[in-house]
Amino acid sequence: MSSCPYCGWPDDEPAQIVSEHPTGDGATRWTRCWCGSLQMRHVARGGEQRITVRGRPQRAVAG
């Protein structure tokens, strides 16, 4: 099982599904981790998921 490199949370338990878009071989799903990191996942027709892009968590803005 893989986990978020920023906070260690399990990748198979995202905090939020932001959006999902059908593709020719499954779907593209955008999710957000508990730390705020955004991930793009390829979801195959059989349900297997693979993270293809992972953003860094957004840092707090001093104000």
Image: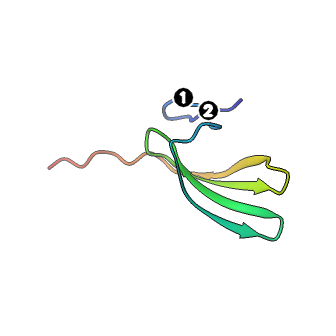
At numbered mark 2, what does the secondary structure look like: helix, strand or loop? loop
Q: Rate crowding at label 2 as few (under 14), some (14 to 19) or many (20 or more) other CA atoms within 10 Å.
A: few
Proximity of marks 1 and 2: CB atoms separated by less than 8 Å: yes
Is residue 57 positioned above or below 42 on the image?
above
Residue shown at 83% from the left, 57% from the top:
45
Residue shown at 74% from the left, 47% from the top:
49
Quadrant of the frame with the N terminus: top right
**Residue 24 image position (x, y, % from top left):** 82, 71
Q: How many marks?
A: 2
At numbered mark 1, what does the secondary structure look like: helix, strand or loop? loop
Is residue 12 positioned above or below 29 on the image?
above
**Residue 62 image position (x, y, % from top left):** 19, 47
Specify whether 62 is left or right of 13. left
Q: Rate crowding at label 1 as few (under 14), some (14 to 19) or many (20 or more) other CA atoms within 10 Å.
A: few
Q: For the view shown, which residue lies furthest in the left direction?
A: 63
Tag on residue 8? 1
Nearer the observer, 42 or 15:
15
Residue shown at 57% from the left, 35% from the top:
4
Can you identify the residue that label 2 sits on? 3
Residue type at tag 2: Ser
The image quarter in which residue 9 lies: top right
Of the two numbered discs 1 and 2 on the same chain, state the one appearing first in sequence: 2
**Residue 52 image position (x, y, % from top left):** 68, 53
**Residue 61 image position (x, y, % from top left):** 24, 49
Specify whether 25 is left or right of 62. right
Q: Which colour assignment does the render follow?
A: rainbow
Is residue 59 positioned above or below 9 on the image?
below
Residue type at tag 1: Gly
